[in-house]
């Protein structure tokens, strides 16, 4: 991926992590919700069934960071760990996946998607996808500084960056799954609008959008902005925890970054 594309990607990275930068109107579904076609997961919590053995190895490195403790068994990353543990105890199923495609259109670091919406709010099935290659290549510098001064990934090594993105996506997961009304709005406002936009592109690629679709897009984007603000705030807290523990962790052989 060229430096230029990476710069664009990082502008979008985490700011609009649910959107794909291939279309001017963000045509790619930001959040997918499926009520049919997917079997109900038998188990709840954060599941790694979809990872290959090699991906699982990288996941273990992230997990070690999340659960790292000081000598008094106090967690070094209480926010990150708390988000993970909420999912584990929630009754919902959240699969973890690693994005394997190198398509240039997918400039995102991670995504959170609901695969199966439970109208009772008890057993949603969702997936967090981490794009490790994009995270590895992400540009870090003034160009990616956010309005609040925070520069994503600043001073973090590879595995710590993965942990930061995981924190962002877990924040989405907890914020959405913890509230049935919010999950429903995600379904109504985001999913339906994405479907309409996709079918519009499929049928009349060059035609301008209808007034109704424009209104829906405005509403969807405003809702996504709210969701992003919440996840970004949590991500910044997670970054702070990673920075504070960095020196201590690097002295421990299990947590030192491997070449
Ligand atoms: Zn996000």
Image (tube, rainbow, N blue to C red):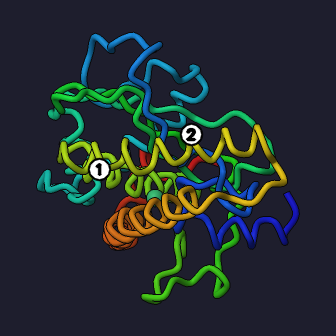
Left or right of residue 46: residue 55 = right
Q: Are marks 1 and 2 in contact (CB under 8 Å)?
A: no
Where residue 118 sits in the image (x, y, percent)? 25, 27
Left or right of residue 190: residue 82 = left
Pick the front one: 1 or 40: 40
Q: Residue at x 44, y 48 (%)?
A: 253
Q: Residue at x 59, y 47 (%)?
A: 258
Left or right of residue 139: residue 183 = left
Where residue 90 sits in the image (x, y, percent)? 16, 34
Where residue 190 sits in the image (x, y, percent)? 45, 49
Residue 20, above or below 215:
above
Q: Which residue is mark 2?
A: 195
Q: Residue at x 44, y 26 (%)?
A: 34
Where residue 31 sits in the image (x, y, percent)? 48, 44
- Image disc number at residue 95: none
Provide the secondary structure element on which disc 2 rests.
Answer: helix
- Callout 1 crowding tier (Cα within 10 Å): few <14, some 14–19, many ≥20: many
Q: Is residue 242 visible?
A: no
Residue 127, above or below 15:
above
Q: Residue furthest front?
A: 211
Q: First in sequence, mark 1 or 2: give its number.
A: 1
Pick the front one: 237 or 170: 170
Q: Residue furthest right?
A: 2
Depth-wise, is mark 1 or mark 2 nearer the camera? 2
Quadrant of res 88: top left
**Quarter occupied by the N terminus:** bottom right
Q: Which residue is mark 1?
A: 68
Residue 202, above or below 134:
above
Q: Is residue 72 visible?
A: yes
Quadrant of res 121: top left
- Callout 2 crowding tier (Cα within 10 Å): few <14, some 14–19, many ≥20: some
Provide the secondary structure element on which disc 1 rests.
Answer: loop
């Amino acid at each position: 991926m060229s430096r230029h594309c990476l710069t664009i990607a990082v502008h979008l990275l985490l700011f609009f992590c649910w959107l794909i930068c291939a279309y001017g109107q963000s045509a790619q579904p930001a959040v997918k919700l499926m009520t049919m076609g997917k079997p109900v997961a038998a188990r709840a919590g954060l599941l790694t069934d979809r990872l290959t053995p090699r991906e699982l190895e990288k996941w273990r490195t992230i997990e070690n960071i999340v659960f790292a403790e000081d000598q008094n068994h106090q967690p070094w990353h209480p926010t990150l760990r708390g988000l993970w543990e909420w999912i584990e105890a929630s009754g919902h199923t959240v699969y973890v996946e690693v994005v394997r495609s190198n398509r240039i259109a997918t400039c995102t670091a991670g995504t959170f998607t609901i695969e199966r919406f439970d109208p009772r709010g008890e057993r949603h099935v969702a997936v967090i996808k981490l794009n490790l290659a994009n995270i590895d290549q992400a540009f870090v510098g003034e160009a990616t500084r956010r309005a609040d001064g925070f520069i994503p990934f600043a001073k973090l090594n590879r595995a710590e960056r993965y942990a930061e993105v995981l924190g962002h996506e877990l924040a989405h997961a907890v914020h959405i799954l913890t509230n049935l009304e919010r999950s429903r709005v995600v379904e109504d406002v985001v999913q339906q609008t994405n479907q309409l936009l996709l079918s519009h592109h499929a049928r009349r690629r060059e035609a301008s959008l209808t007034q109704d679709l424009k209104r829906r897009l405005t509403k969807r984007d405003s809702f996504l902005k709210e969701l992003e603000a919440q996840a970004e705030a949590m991500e910044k807290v997670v970054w702070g925890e990673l920075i504070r523990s960095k020196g201590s962790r690097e002295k421990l052989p299990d947590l030192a970054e491997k070449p």
